[in-house]
Amino acid sequence: MAANRRRHRVFFTRHTEYHLRGDECVGVRERSTGEWLADHAALRLHALQLPAVLDSASWVGRRIHFWGSATDVLTSPVVSVGRPERDEVYAYVSQARAGSIARASVDLEEHEPPRVGLDGCLPAL
């Protein structure tokens, strides 16, 4: 039997859809409006534990815990698991072009200006 090549899944909670590629959250959408949430904290985070693709329905009633170096997100209980529509995959944050992802506003005066050249790649001493 051929290996299962499905990489994308959608975990539905009461109010939100979490779209995952493997264990990475690549899209979050509000269920009531269908609006993609480009600034959601779960985006680009990795789920700590997920069921096998063929056993996704076993996750109903459980929460997804996403982890990142700067933040964690714990979803409300999953009510359903499915596969995304093909056109939804093209709306994922991972498909966005540079500059099109909404970012939280940052007061640039509070931060050091970026260093140009190799110095910007090296750790501070």
Image (cartoon, rainbow, N blue to C red):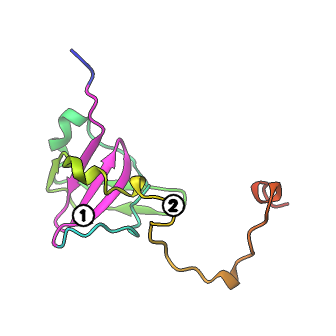
Residues at discs 2 and 1 in contact (Cβ within 8 Å): no
Who is closer to the viewer here, 4 or 102? Answer: 102
Q: Residue at x 58, y 79 (%)?
A: 106
Question: Residue 58, percent across and down?
Answer: 17, 42
Q: Earlier in the sequence, mark 2 or mark 1?
A: 1
Highlighted magenta segment, given as a residue range: 4-32
Q: Quick one: SS at disc 2?
A: loop
Mark 2 to mark 1: distance in Å? 31 Å
Q: Which residue is mark 2?
A: 98
Look at the image and say whether residue 14 sits in the magenta stretch.
yes
Q: Secondary structure at mark 1?
A: loop
Q: Nearer the viewer, residue 96 or 25?
A: 96
Q: Residue at x 30, y 43 (%)?
A: 50
Question: Could you say where residue 27 lies in the image, as x and y percent from the top left?
Answer: 33, 57
Taking 39 as reference, is 11 left or right?
Answer: left
Q: Nearest the camera: 110 or 60?
A: 110
Camera-side residue of 90 and 24 = 90
Residue picked out by circle 1: 76
As drawn, 22 above or below 93: above
Q: Residue placed at 41% from the left, 53% from the top?
A: 94
Residue 122, by quadrant, is bottom right
Asked if residue 31 lies in the magenta stretch, the reply is: yes
Residue 102 lies in what quarter of the image? Answer: bottom left
Number of other residues with Cα within 10 Å of mark 2, as a class: few under 14, some 14 to 19, many 20 or more: few
Instruction: Name the image quarter holding the N terminus.
Output: top left
Mark 1 is on which residue type?
A: Ser
Q: Amino acid at mark 2?
A: Ala
Alpha-carbon neighbours of circle 1 within 10 Å: few (<14), some, or many (≥20)?
A: some
Taking the image as shown, residue 87 lies to the left or right of residue 104, namely left
Q: Quadrant of residue 74?
A: bottom left
